[in-house]
Amino acid sequence: MAFSSIAKNLNRYSIIQSINDFDIYTKQDISRNTKLSFPTTSKIVDELVAENVIHTLSGKRNDTGGRKAYEYQLDKEYAHSLCMIIEPNRIKTIITNMALEKKDAAEKVVDGDVTIQTILSFAQEHYVRNPKIRSFAVGVPGAVHKGKIFLIDGFKKLQNCELQNIIRQTFHIPAVVLNNMNALISGFGKKSFDNSVRENIACIHIGENGPGCSCLVNGAPVSGFCGFQGEIGFNLFDSTRTFREIALNDYQNVNMQDYIGRLAVQIITMINPHQIMIYLTRNMPETDIKEYCMQYLPREVIPQFAYLHTYEADYTAGLMAAGIELIFSTIYQIHDI
């Protein structure tokens, strides 16, 4: 019985993956694309229709008078995901459908510290208005391990918070809590690169509380064994200060080319990336980081550098993708209907 369930889950996965572009298919198309037998395909498609995951489009007479095969389409409005971005004194939300189309967006200004109750209350407002919400994806500017925020500057009430478990227990739907840079690299990677390209890419975000970094290594995001990867602010800038301490002192009396260049040199020697994407905030000047790195490193190892102004868009895209993947992961499993 266990083997049968696993096999059926794999078949469901194969069928859903074959139609997740939201195009229109017949059962024959799906059977051919998945290489599953027609009876197996037909049974699973009928189950997904009964679960309202898939639309049935009525068959029509063709030119010869025969009946055209029924057509099917993954319902992009089957479920929605609520994505939340936690920032100092504010929470931003985006609701997306299965096709990653934004359905709604909102913002809540918080008087004082952002707390667990603030997050849950704002989420509840959305949940009541939109019963199609079936997953949560939350992004925070801190280190996260298995949904627990164990390091976060400027959010005293969220330190050591088991936010992921709290959300799951409150709303009884899947939830994920991600570090902002891990979400960003995922969104950037999905937007910019073919999955077949196994590149090493690094992103640096120079924020008000210090720098963050995230990496694609061989095409896959890296987070480390406890989610601490990318906390480069703890590295030494010089003999007396860390990068984080300089940021918390408002970057006073620091040359930004030197600041970013030292970060880049460390990253290049660690993962030797093809590209380094640099996100700046607070109207920081763009500087020639390539020139800086070439003072210390061989020309052959210097990556391509680019300054991007899409931090929030890439961060949001990563959260949206994570939230929808949670919904797909529940659909892949057998349901009683």
Image: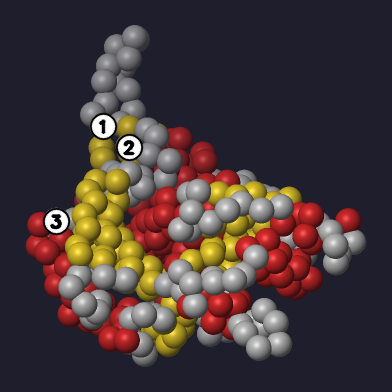
C-beta proximity under 8 Å, tags 2 and 1: yes
The three-letter code of the residue at mark 2 reads Tyr
- Asked if residue 150 is positioned above or below residue 95 in the image, the reply reads below
Give the distance between the C-alpha atoms of the residues marked 1 and 3, in whole angstroms: 26 Å
Residue 150 horizontal/vertical position (percent): 42, 87
Q: Which of disc 2 and disc 3 is earlier in sequence?
A: 2
Residue that carries the numbered disc 2 in the rendered image:
72
Q: Callout 2: 10 Å neighbours few (<14), some, many (20+)?
A: many
Residue 146 in view (yes/no): no
Question: Mark 1, mark 3: which one is toward the viewer?
Answer: 3
Q: Quadrant of the N terminus?
A: bottom left
Give the distance between the C-alpha atoms of the residues marked 2 and 1, in whole angstroms: 6 Å
Mark number displayed over residue 130 = 3
Q: Residue extending furthest left?
A: 128
Mark number displayed over residue 57 = 1
Mark number displayed over residue 80 = none
Decide which of 46, 85 is in the foreground and name it. Answer: 85
Please, what secondary structure does the residue beneath circle 2 have?
strand
Q: Residue extending furthest top?
A: 63
Q: Callout 1: 10 Å neighbours few (<14), some, many (20+)?
A: some
The three-letter code of the residue at mark 3 reads Asn
Q: Residue at x 68, y 61 (%)?
A: 257
Residue 143 horizontal/vertical position (percent): 47, 80
Q: Is residue 280 left or right of residue 54?
A: right
Question: Mark 3, mark 2: which one is toward the viewer?
Answer: 3
